[in-house]
Amino acid sequence: QGILDKISTEKYDYVVLQVPAEFINGPEGDEHDRSIDVYCAAIRSAGGTPVIYEMGWGRDEKAIEGRRKIFAAAVRNHVTHIAPCSTAWERVRRERPDLELQNPPDKAHPGTLGCYLNLCCFCAAITGKELPSFPRDLTIWRHLSDQEKKDAATIVATASFDAYDAALPKWMKRLVLTAKPQTIDIETAAYLQRVAWEEYQRVQKQLAEAREH
């Protein structure tokens, strides 16, 4: 089943469009850009609301231009639900370089704090509200060594999964089984929550200004 068919038949309340800043400004950037128009139209036709996931961990000019193009696509498609994750990452790295948003050696994905920051951004984007006490406990998929992958593969063969996890590919099932609970300290959690909320508010103000013009 294609994505557009899935959107049409499932009748989702929200559909998240993951738009990496590096992709929309990359070699196939124009295609990525145009696809947002197609998906937003399909989502609304099915009675849903599009949510743009501004994704990207880059720090260079390409990432900046990518974020600009994502915002332009949101304005063009009248999207008001934006999770400003890439923007929030840029701010945290600028203000708090001591906070590691990724879990080395994995530099391709969000780490413990990066996932938490993203969650805070999504909460703001979907609810439009600042939560007084966002949970500080979460479960993180870890970067596995080759030996850990082999050990986990054996466990996957005999493990029982719920309906959601059972549909995942094997490599994701390994990560589910080896995930570990994490608790973000109060001070760091409060800072990341504040950044997410303030960046969400800033984007909302920019969207309102763009609509007026």
Image (spheres, rainbow, N blue to C red):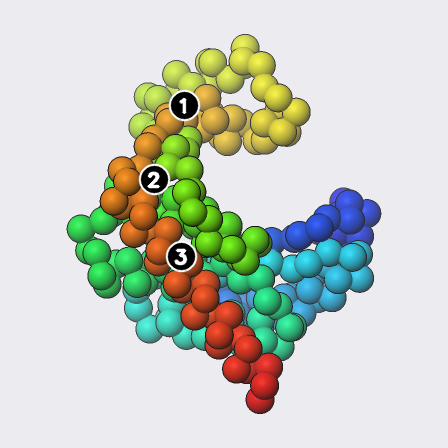
* Structural distance between the alpha carbons of marks 2 and 1: 14 Å
- Quadrant of the image for the C terminus? bottom right
Q: Is residue 185 left or right of residue 157?
A: left
Residue 133, given in percent of the width and then of the height, sits at: 41, 43
Secondary structure beneath disc 1? helix
Residue 8, given in percent of the width and then of the height, sits at: 80, 52
Identify the residue at the far front of this view: 132
Q: How crowded is the residue under tag 3: few (<14 C-alpha within 10 Å), some, or many (20+)?
A: many
Identify the residue at the far top of this view: 158
- Quadrant of the image for the N terminus? top right
* Structural distance between the alpha carbons of marks 2 and 3: 15 Å
Q: Which mark is residue 178?
A: 1
Residue 94, given in percent of the width and then of the height, sits at: 23, 63
Residue occupying the point 49% across, 30% down: 171
Q: Is residue 131 visible?
A: yes
Q: Is residue 54 left or right of residue 112?
A: right
Of residue 78 and residue 2, the one placed in the foreground of this image is 78
Of residue 153 and residue 204, the one placed in the foreground of this image is 204
**First along the sequence among labels 1 and 3:** 1
**First along the sequence among labels 2 and 1:** 2
Residue 136, given in percent of the width and then of the height, sits at: 37, 37
Q: Is residue 142 left or right of residue 211?
A: left
Pointer 3: what residue? 196
